[in-house]
Image: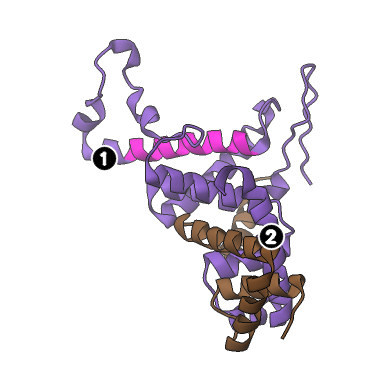
Chain colours: A purple, B brown
Amino acid sequence: MLDLKVNNATMSTHQLNPDTWVDQYADYLFNYAVARVSDAEIAKDLVQETFFAGLKSAKNYKGDAAERTWLIAILKRKVIDHYRKINSKKGKAEVRMGYTNTSEEEGDWLEERVADPFNRGGDDSIENKELGLAIQDCLSKLPKKQSLVFSMKTIQGMTTEDICNELGINPSNLWVMIHRARTTLMGCMNQTWF
Amino acid sequence: MKISCEKATELCTRSQYGEASWWQTLKLKLHLFYCKTCSKFSAKNSKFTSLCEHANMQVISENEKEAMKERLKKQL
């Protein structure tokens, strides 16, 4: 349907394919958001808003960042806006309570408080957030059905019987798919996590 | 009693979810006893299980994803 090619002189290979956004990135963005707003419903809304905003500003996409990086950047703004909204409801005092008093850094503190996934800290929960995203990243590279079966079983904790009924497969199919998925995932995650 | 490495690794995956039968577990254990390669795989598989548990992952259900796609299509 919509395929926005970038014909810039400085061009790279990146381009946007909004048709595949939900399948490819929804879970990744969702985990990113959930780790930061700690509320699944709000996180889902933020993901949807991110996709809308992505469509709207698709013409500004220069192709110098990968699609997902670009969407994460938008989501990051959405998370910040979300906290701004909450804060403005609480009253101004809290918003102005910066940890730095130099005027040129004024207004920066909310941004700085949104954790950067690329900035590794010693903090356990930060590590867990990154771990979840790393698994999610590898998961998005699997064939659709394998990743679906794997997440139903491992992440949603559904019973074998329920999954088989829902997808119309038999248990030995299911185990073969889960086994293949896990083997590929372990290979994908190898360097950093094992 | 003897099983292939392929079968052993698959049983190993089943046992990660606590869904290998008593008999399957026994066959697996015996295989792991003499097969270094599968032992290694088994250790890695267990480690991966614990990684998944610690990751606190969540997914958006397929129904909700479909709804998201619909809403997105309307904007196109």
Secondary structure at badge 1 equals helix
Closest to the camera, between mark 1 and mark 2, is 2
Disc 2 marks which amino acid?
Thr
Percent x, y for residue A107? Answer: 33, 22
**Residue at (47%, 32%) from the top-left corner?**
A119
Label 2: how many residues lie within 10 Å, few (<14), some (14-19) or many (20+)? Answer: some
- Residue density around tag 1, few if under 14, some if 14–19, many if 20 or more, within 10 Å: few
Query: Mark 1 — residue?
Result: A89
Q: CA distance from mark 1 to mark 2?
A: 48 Å
User: Residue shown at 45%/56% (left/top)?
Assistant: B54
Q: Position of residue B13 (x, y in %)?
A: 63, 70
User: Which span of residues is magenta-colored?
Assistant: A68-85
Tag on residue A183? 2
Side of A14 where A87 appears, left or right: left
Q: Quadrant of residue A142?
A: bottom right
Q: Earlier in the sequence, mark 1 or mark 2?
A: 1
Q: Is residue B70 magenta?
A: no
